Image: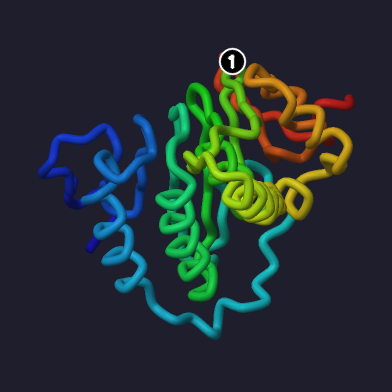
């Protein structure tokens, strides 16, 4: 399927794909992403295994859109979402990581807000290709528990599993950014940890800022 050749969105959802562009513009849940996940799976299946692309030097990258002709395949994700269900987020990320295995670049672009699960998808884009609009925000929070238990033994088991699940859920922040465990715990204590684009750039939660003048700024140019 050529890039941008066809919009697949029969459910008229705000979460859809067009070519190799994924648009996350609504909650990430089973209802809004039912068709999307199947379409992403089909898109990843159509990617070619490209062993010849491994080891290509992509730097210096002048902008996140300046790629050499022999660069790996690119999947774009445009994000303005309040987040949603952890299980659905796992499905999306597993497919995107399969695309990585096929040597695809995952290029993320936060156009508005990337909150909760959407924040994780943005952060796990390919380093060097994670973009935020100058007036956009990223939100990290703990989220809500999926359990409704009443018995003491059930509460203890649920609390143990909840901690294990959340530690796994938040691990990408420690892997892909320079956020410390202490900072991460601080963000989790409030539901209003909105992080500006420039703070995200400092914390390596993104690599580029698109300014309102239409120019790109990275950490190096920001310090001049």
**In the rendering, at what x and y percent does residue 155 appear?**
61, 45
Image location (x, y in percent) of residue 12: 15, 35
Q: Examine the rendered structure and indicate whether residue 192 appears above or below residue 84.
A: above
Could you tell me residue 186's position as x and y percent? 81, 28
x 71%, y 52%: residue: 167
Quadrant where the image shows the N terminus: bottom left
Q: How many marks?
A: 1
**Percent of width and height locating residue 154:** 57, 50
Whether 11 is drawn above or below 50: the answer is above
Using residue 95 as the reference point, say whether residue 145 is left or right of it: right
Query: Can residue 168 be seen in the rendering of this structure?
Result: no
The quarter of the rendered structure image containing the C terminus is top right
Colour style of the rendered protein structure: rainbow
Question: What residue is drawn where x is 26% and y is 47%?
Answer: 18
**Along the line of sight, the residue nearer the viewer: 58 or 112:** 112
Left or right: residue 46 versus residue 64 is left
Q: Which residue is mark 1?
A: 135
Using the image, determine if residue 96 lies above or below residue 9: below
Note whether residue 121 is visible: yes
Instruction: Quadrant for residue 140, please give it.
Output: top right
* Residue located 30% across and 45% down the image: 30
Between residues 47 and 145, which one lies in front from this camera angle? Answer: 145
Residue at 73%, 51% (x, y): give it.
Answer: 176
Left-right relation of 127 to 41: right
Residue positioned most to the bottom: 51
The local crowd at label 1, few if under 14, some if 14 to 19, many if 20 or more residues have their Cα within 10 Å, is some
Compared to 166, does 69 lie above or below? below
Per the image, label 1 sits on a secondary structure element best described as: loop
């Amino acid at each position: 399927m050529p890039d941008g050749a066809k919009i697949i969105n029969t459910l008229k959802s705000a979460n859809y794909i067009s070519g190799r562009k994924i648009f996350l513009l609504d909650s990430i849940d089973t209802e809004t992403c039912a068709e999307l996940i199947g379409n992403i799976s089909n898109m990843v299946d159509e990617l070619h295994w490209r062993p010849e692309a491994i080891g290509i030097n992509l730097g210096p990258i002048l902008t996140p859109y300046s790629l050499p002709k022999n660069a790996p395949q690119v999947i774009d994700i445009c994000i303005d979402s309040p987040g949603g269900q952890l299980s659905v987020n796992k499905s999306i990320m597993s497919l995107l990581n399969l695309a990585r295995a096929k040597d695809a670049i995952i290029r993320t672009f936060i156009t508005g807000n990337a909150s909760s699960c959407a924040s994780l998808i943005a952060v796990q884009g390919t380093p060097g290709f994670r973009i935020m609009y100058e007036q956009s925000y990223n939100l990290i929070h703990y989220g809500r528990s999926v359990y409704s238990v009443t018995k003491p033994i059930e509460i203890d088991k649920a609390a143990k599993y909840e901690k294990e699940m959340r530690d796994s859920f938040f691990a990408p922040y420690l892997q892909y950014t320079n956020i410390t465990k202490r900072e991460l715990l601080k963000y989790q204590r409030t539901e209003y940890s909105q992080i500006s684009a420039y703070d995200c750039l400092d914390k390596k939660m993104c690599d580029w800022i698109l300014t309102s003048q239409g120019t790109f700024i990275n950490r190096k140019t920001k310090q001049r």
